[in-house]
Image (spheres, rainbow, N blue to C red):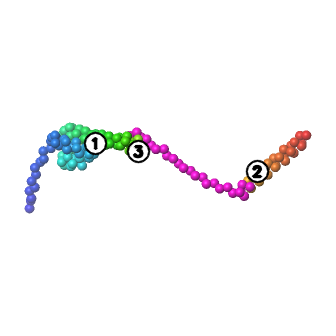
Amino acid sequence: MFYSIPFTPRNVQATESRLKAVYDAAKLGLKGDTLALAAGMLPTEYRQLTQLDPVVEMAAQKGKADGEIEMAKIVRSAALDGDAKMALEVLKHQHGWVAKQAISVEVDQRISITGALAEAAKRLDVIDVQAKEQNAIDHIQR
């Protein structure tokens, strides 16, 4: 048995209301298929429309730019109003600023009294030998 499915092709045109819908969706940050669905079109219809009429792509680009401008103004005003976290985000993302990396090294050194005395005794032995050698040299030279 064969069922008939009624099909009526949709007329895809870049009307003012469709361009406004594309602009609004792009302004919210939507892209691709999500943008098409939010603008009331099927993704294939949106792709077809962008190929047929470059004004549709321009509406999407303008919406994206206007959305970015709005967010940039909000972030900038928050930073200028004293929000330190926003100021740091602006520095990092727009100016490429990176916080300095600090490395803390702690050295725990213990001194052994007996070890220190042994080292001192060795030095004294060396000094005594050098002094005796010098005395012998002085005695020979006389």
Residue 7 position in % (x across, y down):
10, 51
Q: How many labels does the image show?
A: 3
Dominant secondary structure, magenta: loop
User: What residue is disc 3 on?
Assistant: 84
Task: State the mark number for residue 67.
Answer: 1
User: What residue is disc 2 on?
Assistant: 123
**Mark 2 is on which residue type?**
Arg
Residue extending furthest toward the bottom: 1
* Residue occupying image coordinates x 23% and y 38%: 58
**Mark 3 is on which residue type?**
Ala
Secondary structure beneath dot 1 equals helix
* Residue occupying image coordinates x 39% and y 43%: 82
- Quadrant in the rendering for residue 141: top right
Q: Give the residues in magenta.
A: 94-117
Would you say residue 49 is visible in this rendering? no
Q: Give the quadrant of the N terminus.
A: bottom left
Q: Which of marks 3 and 2 is in front?
A: 3
Residue 84 position in % (x across, y down):
41, 44
Query: Quick one: label 3 or label 1, which is nearer the N terminus?
Result: 1
Task: State the mark number for residue 107.
Answer: none
The answer to whether mark 3 and mark 2 are in CB contact below 8 A is no
Q: Distance between the residues labelled 1 and 2?
A: 77 Å
Q: Residues within 10 Å of mark 3 (few under 14, many from 20)?
A: few
* Residue occupying image coordinates x 87% and y 45%: 136
Q: Which of marks 3 and 1 is in front?
A: 3
**Within the magenta stretch, is there residue 105?**
yes
